[in-house]
């Protein structure tokens, strides 16, 4: 038996609770992992609360991330006792996920946890931090460097935002943090932001071309803010867009793209090939000392994940939540 959060569907909607589950109910897969830590991402919060169509089949154990040790393996590349982690692949959506003491998955979804990173820290990073690294790598592939100019990060007090700031700062960029929580200014400056911008300045409908302000941006919120960000990027600049915390819409025109040569890079962590995942985690391991995970992360117990999901969607959580699945 193992403990997990289970989401079940009833006539009047869905319900999530912590419960004990028999090992025989684990889904098909060639590797079984004893999970040591998990986390709560925005997507997990949507799944647990039912506020977004994340769960594809019920009952479902949510959790798009986990880190732990291999308990049994029929996969040629993965040995019993190895430390592994998983991000995405539809886990926690269509295959039982990480908010659990155990998972059974396909071996090709797992990557080895870098030596520098403990299971808890891997989950303090989680899909949010891995996505922040994918955004940074996409900006670098585009040719961005610290001499290009300032980089804006939106949704700065959130998980992707906080780790993006710390990563960019460590790489030598001057970072501007846009937040709806000006009270978090000290925290954001502590992570490495040189300026903190009230997101109200970016939230109203604006002209498609505005004053040129930043060389690049990592956007975690979408909607009007992304439109205003694209309108304010310097000519030939670049935006890595990964999130939709404000909304899925994108009310702009082609003007920033055809009149200023702005480039918009879409980031989808779920579909990244294995080689890019391994590279992102290698670099996260290399950067671990500068990620300020103790500043960014709060540790919670498995049972707390249900209430925390509501708080996360209401914008009440700062940074990242690491989940101790054994408590
Ligand atoms: P968090 O909830 O931790 O952070 C989101 C932040 O967005 C909040 O902290 C808040 O920051 C800001 N925000 C919240 N509501 C609004 C609003 N109505 N308008 C403007 N800003 C708002 O989530 P994550 O950082 O984990 O994820 C951020 C986004 O990225 C989510 O949409 C998530 O689904 C997406 N994502 C996408 C991935 C991908 O592969 N593309 C992978 C991981 C995440 P503040 O208070 O500072 O303004």
Image (cartoon, rainbow, N blue to C red):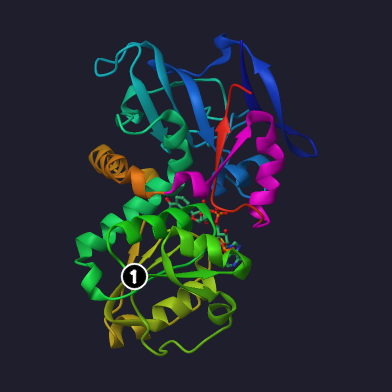
109 to the left or right of 190: left
- For the magenta stretch, what is the residue range? 292-315
Residue 54 falls in image quadrant:
top right
Residue drawn 24% across and 19% down?
77
Residue 187 drawn at (x, y percent) = 53, 60
On the question of residue 214 being in view, the answer is yes
Q: Residue 311 colored magenta? A: yes
Quarter of the image where one finds residue 138: bottom left
Query: Residue shown at 36%/33% (left/top)?
Result: 117
Give the quadrant of the C terminus.
Answer: top right
83 vs 66, left or right, is left
Q: Is residue 155 left or right of residue 301?
A: left
* On-image quarter of the N terminus: top right
Left or right of 261 in this view: 125: right
- Residue highlighted by disc 1: 174
Query: Looking at the magenta stretch, what is its main secondary structure?
Result: helix
Q: Secondary structure at mark 1?
A: loop
Q: Nearer the viewer, residue 16 or 232?
A: 232
Displayed quadrant of residue 22? top right
Q: Residues within 10 Å of mark 1 (few under 14, many from 20)?
A: many
Residue visible at 26% across and 39% down in the picture: 282
Answer whether residue 254 is visible to the viewer in this image. no
Whole-percent x, y for residue 221 in the image: 51, 64
Q: Please tell me which residue lies in front, 289 or 286.
A: 289
Percent x, y for residue 36?
49, 23
Residue 243 lies within the magenta run: no
Residue 212, placed above or below residue 21: below
Residue 85 locus on image (x, y percent): 39, 30
Height in image: 282 above or below 303?
below
Q: Residue furthest right?
A: 12
Q: How many marks?
A: 1
Question: Closest to the observer: 27 or 284?
Answer: 284
């Amino acid at each position: 038996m193992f403990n997990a959060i289970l989401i079940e569907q009833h006539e009047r909607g869905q319900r999530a609770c912590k419960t004990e589950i028999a090992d025989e109910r684990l889904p098909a897969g060639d590797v079984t992992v004893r999970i040591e830590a998990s986390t709560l991402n925005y997507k997990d919060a949507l799944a647990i609360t039912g506020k977004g169509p994340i769960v594809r089949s019920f009952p479902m154990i949510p959790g798009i991330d986990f880190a732990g040790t291999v308990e049994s393996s029929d996969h040629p590349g993965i040995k019993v006792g190895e430390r592994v982690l998983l991000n995405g692949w539809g886990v926690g959506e269509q295959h039982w996920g990480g908010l659990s003491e155990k998972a059974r998955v396909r071996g090709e979804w797992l990557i080895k946890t870098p030596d520098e990173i403990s299971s808890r820290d891997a989950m303090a990073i989680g899909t949010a931090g891995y996505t922040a690294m994918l955004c940074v790598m996409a900006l670098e592939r585009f040719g961005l460097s610290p001499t290009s100019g300032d980089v804006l990060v939106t949704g700065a007090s959130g998980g992707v935002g906080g780790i993006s700031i710390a990563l960019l700062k460590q790489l030598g960029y001057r970072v501007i943090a846009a937040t709806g929580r000006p009270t978090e200014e000290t925290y954001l400056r502590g992570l490495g932001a040189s300026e903190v911008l009230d997101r109200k300045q970016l939230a109203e409908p604006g002209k498609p071309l505005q004053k040129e302000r930043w060389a690049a941006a990592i956007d975690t919120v979408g909607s009007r803010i992304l439109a205003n960000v694209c309108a304010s990027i310097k000519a030939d600049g670049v935006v890595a867009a990964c999130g939709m915390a404000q909304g899925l819409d994108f009310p702009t025109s082609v003007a920033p793209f055809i009149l200023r040569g702005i480039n918009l890079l879409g980031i989808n962590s779920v579909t990244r090939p294995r080689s890019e995942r391994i590279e992102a985690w290698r670099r996260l391991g290399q950067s671990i000392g500068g990620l300020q995970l103790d500043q960014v992360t709060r540790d919670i117990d498995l049972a707390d994940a249900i209430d925390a999901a509501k708080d996360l969607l209401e914008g009440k959580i700062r940074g990242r939540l690491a989940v101790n699945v054994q408590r």
